[in-house]
Amino acid sequence: MVTIRCLHALSEWEGLSVLSEGTWAQADKSLKKKIAPLASAAAWNLRDWDTMPEYVAAIPDDTVIAPPHLYSTATYLAVFTKAGRFVLQGNYAHTRSKL
């Protein structure tokens, strides 16, 4: 996890993507929750749209949204993707609580 965080901080998207994909396959649910925002940032920056849904799905629904300047674009997109899913499910109260 330390290497994944370092690669994210350095914006080393290729290396982060490769390491995330390899780690993801063997990771338990708890580790996937930690990797998902970082892996989704790599996928976003590499325009790897095929892996984004899997990473976004692993980000917990109760993720607290910080001010936009504290988020990477990918994490921000992931949270709004989840909000959109709640809207489609008709869960408007839950969506408002996340935004």
Image: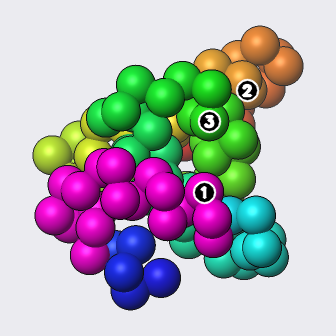
Of the image marks 1 and 3, the number of the one nearer the N terminus: 1
Q: Is residue 94 above or below residue 7?
A: above
Q: Amino acid at mark 2?
A: Phe
Find disc 3 in the rendering and name its residue. Answer: 51
Mark 1 and 3 residues: CB-CB less than 8 Å, in contact? yes
Q: Is residue 29 above or below residue 38?
A: below
Q: Residues within 10 Å of mark 3 (few under 14, many from 20)?
A: some
Label 1, label 3: how far apart the Cα atoms are: 9 Å
3 lies left or right of 11: right
User: Residue 85 at x, y = what percent?
Assistant: 72, 23
User: Residue 73 at x, y = what percent?
Assistant: 29, 36
15 lies left or right of 69: right
Instruction: Identify the residue at image location x=70%, y=41%.
Output: 54
Looking at the image, is mark 3 or mark 2 nearer the viewer? 3
Find disc 1 in the rendering and name its residue. Answer: 21
Q: Amino acid at mark 3?
A: Thr
Tell me, yes or no, whether the highlighted magenta stretch contains residue 19. yes
Q: Main secondary structure of the magenta part?
A: helix
Say if residue 98 shows up in the picture: yes
Q: Amino acid at mark 1?
A: Glu
Residue extending furthest toward the right: 89
The local secondary structure at tag 1 comes to helix
Visual colour scheme = rainbow
